[in-house]
Image (cartoon, rainbow, N blue to C red):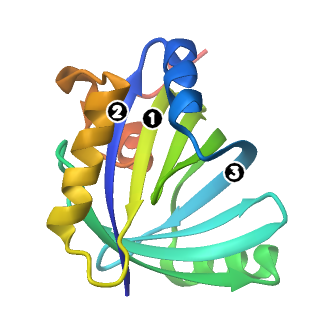
Amino acid sequence: MAHNVEIKAFLDQPEALRERIAALADAGPTLLEQEDTFFHSRNGRLKLRKGGAGAELIYYERSDSKAPTESAYLKMPVDDAPMTEAMLAVALDVRGTVKKKRELYQIGQTRVHIDDVDGLGSFLELEVELGSGQTTSDGEAIARQLIQELGLEEGALVAEAYIDLLESLPPPPEE
């Protein structure tokens, strides 16, 4: 499996952060609209991501932590997203759906996302792609340095995945 190091933070003022990210970025922003349908999985998390030019099936294992954390993942392009979603829904049951608008930047070997997640708000997500010979500790150090450079507060860090945060919301009031 491929590996990266990830960290996520809630943003109450994404506009100010955009300027800091843009000043550091090697590329971006690329604007994406994504819909992730999560399926019940015995291990890790399994989602079908639709958006942009296509779809992909993504399986990943990551512990819930506010600290920079290693994520192991597999990705597979999907040619027929509707059929894949229908098949997985029957076999595994749908856990939920996360819809987001994403701004993607690249800073060195780190993908930087500003996500506007339906029902949750704005978040920053860092994904440090580990290169050949790099350790998880190397990725954690890169993530911590970038957190410092961007001026993120410790209290803004989030441990859970978006799907977990959505599941923890109270149900909407009945009309």
Report the mark closest to the observer, 3 or 2.
Answer: 2
Disc 3: which residue: 34
Label 1: which residue?
Answer: 124
User: 13 or 141, which lies in front?
Assistant: 141
Name the quadrant of the C terminus: top right
Disc 1 residue crowd, few under 14, some 14–19, many 20+, Cα 10 Å = many
What whole-number distance in Å separates the C-alpha atoms at marks 2 and 1?
A: 5 Å
The quadrant in which residue 69 appears is bottom left
Q: Is residue 111 above or below residue 72?
A: above
Q: Residues within 10 Å of mark 2 (few under 14, many from 20)?
A: many
Of the residues shown, which amino acid type is indicated by label 1? Leu
Q: Is residue 168 visible?
A: no
The residue type indicated by label 3 comes to Gln
93 horizontally vs 167: left or right: right
Instruction: Indicate the position of residue 6 as horizontal and vertical percent values.
Output: 33, 54
Q: Compare marks 3 and 2 and give the one earlier in the sequence.
A: 2
SS type, badge 1: strand
- Given residues 129 and 160, the one toward you in this image is 129
Q: Residue placed at 73% from the left, 45% from the top?
A: 30
| Residue 117 drawn above or below residue 159 | above
Percent across and percent down for residue 87 are 67, 83
Looking at the image, residue 132 sits to the left or right of residue 120; the answer is left
Query: At numbered mark 3, what does the secondary structure look like: helix, strand or loop?
Result: strand
| Disc 2 to disc 1: CB gap under 8 Å | yes
Element assignment for label 2: strand
Q: What residue is at 43 percent from the left and 43 percent from the top?
A: 125
- Label disc, if present, on residue 9 of the rendered structure: 2
